[in-house]
Amino acid sequence: MPPFDTLNPTWMVWDNPAPAREEAVLEYTRELEKFLAEIERRAFRMAQVALRDPDDAMDVVQDTMLKLARNYASKPSNEWRPLFYRILENGIRDLQRRRAVRKRVMTWLPGAKEDPDNEAQDPLESVADASPAIPEVLMRDQAMVQLEDSLRSLPARQREAFMLRNFEGLDVAETASAMGCSEGSVKTHYSRAVHTLREKLGEVW
Amino acid sequence: MNEPTSVQPRSPLEDRSRALFNDSVEGLDFAVRSRLTQARHAAVEAAAAAERRPRWFSRAGILAPAGVTAAAILGAVLWLGSPLGHHAVTVADGQPNLDDLEMVASTDEGAGDALDMLQDDIEFYDWADKAANSGSAT
């Protein structure tokens, strides 16, 4: 039997992994953090455009980050972006489906005609800002509101294709991977989305 | 950030909508940024914890049912190989040991009487057989 001090006990100790492995973990968590920091705000805005409600958007983005970190962080980092957006779009779709079911149930229930998502707005929100605003900023905000409304009116797949390709700058293959469809479908959805948006916004812009 | 690699030139609508989106991202308020940062830290912690976990731990979900199945098979083999199991099988097959049968027969008094009666009737059956033969001959 070998003397005890020649045994390497590192494999038996759970909280003290080998230094090389610990370094690798640190390296890859650093990379993951950098990736998430780059993407989180844009992802939040995309979710907010689709869902309108900022709290719902935040929930979906948080879930997406956790799912990517727990299940797919070991994948090569160049695959993270399409994976992230795939999880995000699935989360958005799930939430929209749940909302639709809830809305249907609420219409059946007597005395519950109001959708909880469309709560009465705070009257203070509609009061004009007293601070002097630059006309350009106002116009830009207004244009963004119109753009968001038009994007929400698009079919979900067209909206996804437009946002991923145009806002996020994914190429056709990455967008297809994120949407779980063929590259041909991405091109079709994108082209239709641009066409519809041009029809809707052409007069205003 | 990748640029879309479309062959067609970008339209003003695409350019303007992208610029508006970028502006809206930059204009996110502090509270939202703070919540996103917290979510990011939680996600990174989760990834680090998953990576530090021993490899076999993540496979426990597969190994546990396999271990239970192996234990069940071993138990069945041991049970069938034991004397108790062996005895049970022979009785179930309808082939009890002959020694056991003799023991039962020897202790059964009724069985002994039946054999004696059979011995007494042998003479009667012999006479009946002869009478039948002689009758048919005549």
Image: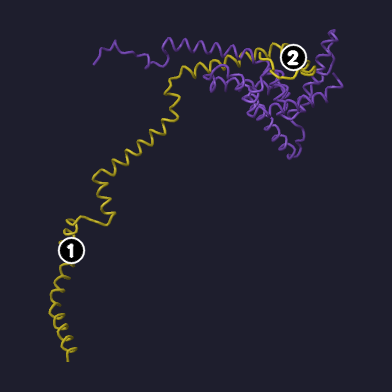
For image coordinates 70% across by 25% down, the residue present is A161
Whether labels 1 and 2 belong to a single chain: the reply is yes
Q: Quadrant of residue B136?
A: bottom left
Q: Residues within 10 Å of mark 1 (few under 14, many from 20)?
A: few
Of B69 and A201, nearer the camera is A201
Q: Quadrant of the C terminus of chain B?
A: bottom left
Q: Residue furthest right?
A: A203
Q: Colour of chain B?
A: yellow
Residue B63 at x, y percent in the picture: 41, 30
Question: Please, what is the three-letter code of the amino acid marked with disc 1?
Answer: Asp
Chain identifier of the purple chain: A
Q: Residues within 10 Å of mark 2 (few under 14, many from 20)?
A: some
Residue A196 at x, y percent in the picture: 79, 27
Residue A168 at x, y percent in the picture: 68, 18
| Secondary structure category for the residue under label 1 | loop
Mark 1 or mark 2, which is nearer to you?
Answer: 2
Circle nearer the N terminus (1, 2): 2
* Image position of B87 (left or right of A94): left
Q: CA distance from mark 1 to mark 2?
A: 103 Å
* Image position of B12 (left or right of A168): right
Provide the chain ID for the residue under circle 1: B
Q: Residue furthest bottom?
A: B138
For image coordinates 38% across by 37% down, the residue present is B69
* Residue bearing the label numbered 1: B108
Above or below: residue A100 compared with residue B129: above
* Image position of A68 (left or right of B99): right
Provide the chain ID for the residue under circle 2: B
Q: Quadrant of the N terminus of chain B?
A: top right
| Secondary structure category for the residue under label 2 | helix
Residue A70 at x, y percent in the picture: 53, 21
For image coordinates 69% across by 27% down, the residue present is A186
* Residue bearing the label numbered 2: B24
